[in-house]
Amino acid sequence: MDLAFLTPLTDRSGPWASVYIDTSRHSASTAQERSVEAAGVQRSLAAVGADEPTCRAVRAAVDDLQHTSEPMGRALFAAQGEVALDLPLSTAPVPSAGWGALPRTTPLLDLVGEDPLCLVAHVDRKGADLELHSARGDMTVGTVSGRQWPVHRTATADWSERHFQLRVENTWEHNAGEIAEAVADRQAETQAELVVLVGDDRECASVKDKLPGPLRDRTMRARHGAGSRLLGVELEQARAQHVARRVSHEMERYAEAFGRQEGAVAGVPGLVDAAREHRVEELLVRPEGPDPHREVWVGQSPDQVAVRRTDAIALGAKDPVSARADDALMRCAAASGAAALSVSAATPDSGPAGGLGALLRWTEPATDVAGS
């Protein structure tokens, strides 16, 4: 997962309120229930030491969800009397309200989750309609109008019709080429990770054959047509399978690199060094492991993170505070342009044993903390 969306949380000092709201249940009394929930969140934050301006800001933000059509939930992160990030979720969360030195962002790896964009092309002989499918719904991203005639063969096999039949074949091939070109362009624009072709076998096969090789490998034909209620289910299954393959691939990369003792790291001390030096390419998190809960020390800057308080001071932190290792590493990864991936769906023996690991951009001996 690209962590760029966490940027608003990396350049502001805390402490932070981290609030997760379930909006998946809707009824005639939802607005009243949300108002009660907003007041309860304010009281919960105040009880754990949150300042009054931040409590009021969070209450107002939860109150604003009274009439939301958000299908799953929201995550709110607030500090210094202001909500810095209001994030829609793709999975309904367990409602919670916390207060700490850093924003509690690790749950987002499963709640926002890997949401691969799926470019869907509804193909026929005359052109195609292109849609972008994600957990947030569908969005039209283009229409392809090819040659409109001739597109239908005649029923006769008379020799005089052969020229016409050839023109039909040429029209099909021409339109398939235009559709393939449009699909490739939209995929490049949207960075869709999957392409699904919906339509008859022949038209879909012609379009797929004309796609660039790397894109062809990520393209599949749907078993169900545009009018089928099962098409949406099939698209969700394709996205879930893509995520599972990605997790499996990253676990294989990690296991190979870790076995070579080059290009991967596990354990909080090694991860802290790598993150501080911006060597983390992708942070791997198994939330149920013991390492995410370990204590580290942080300053105002994302790079001011250390296992010991004295080391954090040596890095320039004037008044270091303790924080969870996973949240500190998530902040550091987001600030350095690294990615993160939840590996909770992987088998327990295929990822970092303690629950935290990373694939590295490069490997080098850790530098002395005081000289960093």
Image: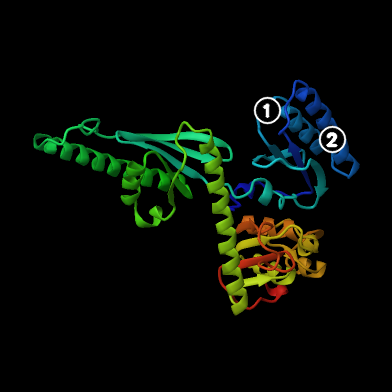
Can residue 279 be seen in the rendering of this structure?
no
CB under 8 Å between callouts 2 and 1? no
Tell me the quarter of the picture where residue 40 sits.
top right
Residue at horizontal 53 percent and vertical 42 percent from the top: 234
Amino acid type of the residue tagged 1 in the rendering: Thr
Quarter occupied by residue 32? top right
Q: Is residue 155 left or right of residue 203?
A: left
233 vs 13: above or below: above
Residue at 47% across, 49% down: 194
Residue located beneath label 1 in the image: 68
Closer to us: 71 or 40: 71
- What residue is rendered at 25% in x and 39% in y? 172
Q: How is the image coloured?
A: rainbow
Which residue is disc 2 drawn over?
42
Q: Relative to 90, is 159 on the left or the right?
A: left
- Disc 2 or disc 1, which is closer to the eye? 1
